[in-house]
């Protein structure tokens, strides 16, 4: 059994880094590039743009598309936005954002004897959450 830290480092962290680099590279993005980066189909990107009244994809539009998209990375971002990106995270916050079993997250917090974490200390919790790809 792996830990969620391994999943985070292999699947989520690289995606976040790719998105960061992409957003720094320009301010007028092609639908195909956005779709590929966010693991969405181009039709979904177009539908989101239509419903959100977006005529082009700049940084702000990209974040709106990401917030409304159906892929895993989009849903993670939407849940983070829903919590207003707090400076510290509780076990409930972590379970919600990363779609993890709340009892496993609470157990990790108890094991570490902590009540909340920051983005920098979150990996300590992740390392104590069992994870399998089917979870």
Image: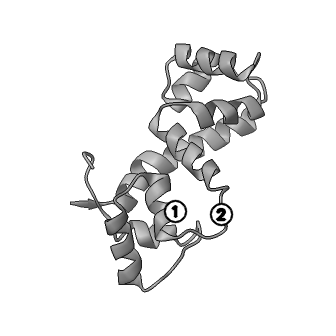
Picture quadrant where residue 38 is located = top right
**At numbered mark 2, what does the secondary structure look like: helix, strand or loop?**
loop
Q: Which residue is mark 2?
A: 86
Left or right of 60 on screen, residue 8: left
Question: Residue 34: in sight, yes or no?
Answer: yes
Q: Is residue 39 above or below residue 113?
A: above
Of the pair 28 and 82, the residue shown nearer to us: 82
Residue lying at 24% horizontally and 45% vertically, measured from the top left: 134
Name the residue tied to disc 1. 93
**Left or right: 90 as drawn, with respect to 103:** right
Which of 14/134 is in front? Answer: 134
- Is 121 left, or right, of 95 in this rendering? right
Quadrant showing the N terminus: bottom left
Q: Is residue 24 above or below residue 61?
A: below
Contact between labelled residues 1 and 2, with CB atoms less than 8 Å apart: yes
Residue 105 in the image, given as x and y percentages of width and height: 38, 68
Q: Residues within 10 Å of mark 1 (few under 14, many from 20)?
A: many
For this rendering, which residue is in front, 120 or 112? 112
Q: Position of residue 70 (x, y in %)?
A: 49, 31
Q: Is residue 30 visible?
A: no
Tell me where residue 44 sits by quadrant. top right
Which mark identifies residue 30? Answer: none
Q: Who is closer to the viewer here, 83 or 29?
A: 83
Q: Could you tell me which secondary element the residue under label 1 belongs to?
A: helix
Residue depicted at x 38% and y 81%: 110
Q: Residue at x 50, y 80 (%)?
A: 115
**Identity of the residue furthest to the left in this view:** 1
Give the residue drawn at x 67%, y 55%: 84
Residue 127 position in % (x across, y down): 37, 68
Q: Earlier in the sequence, mark 2 or mark 1?
A: 2
């Amino acid at each position: 059994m792996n830990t969620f830290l391994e999943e985070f480092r292999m699947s989520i962290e690289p995606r976040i880094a790719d998105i960061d680099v992409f957003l720094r590279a320009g301010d007028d993005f092609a639908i195909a590039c956005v779709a590929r980066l966010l693991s969405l189909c181009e039709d979904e990107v177009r539908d989101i743009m239509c419903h959100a009244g977006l005529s082009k994809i700049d940084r702000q539009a990209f974040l709106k598309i990401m917030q409304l998209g159906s892929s895993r990375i989009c849903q993670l971002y939407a849940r983070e936005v829903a919590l207003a990106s707090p400076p510290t995270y509780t076990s409930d916050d972590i379970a919600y954002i990363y779609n993890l079993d709340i009892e496993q997250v609470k157990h990790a917090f108890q094991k570490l004897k902590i009540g909340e974490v920051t983005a920098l200390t979150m990996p300590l919790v992740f390392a104590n959450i069992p994870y399998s790809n089917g979870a």
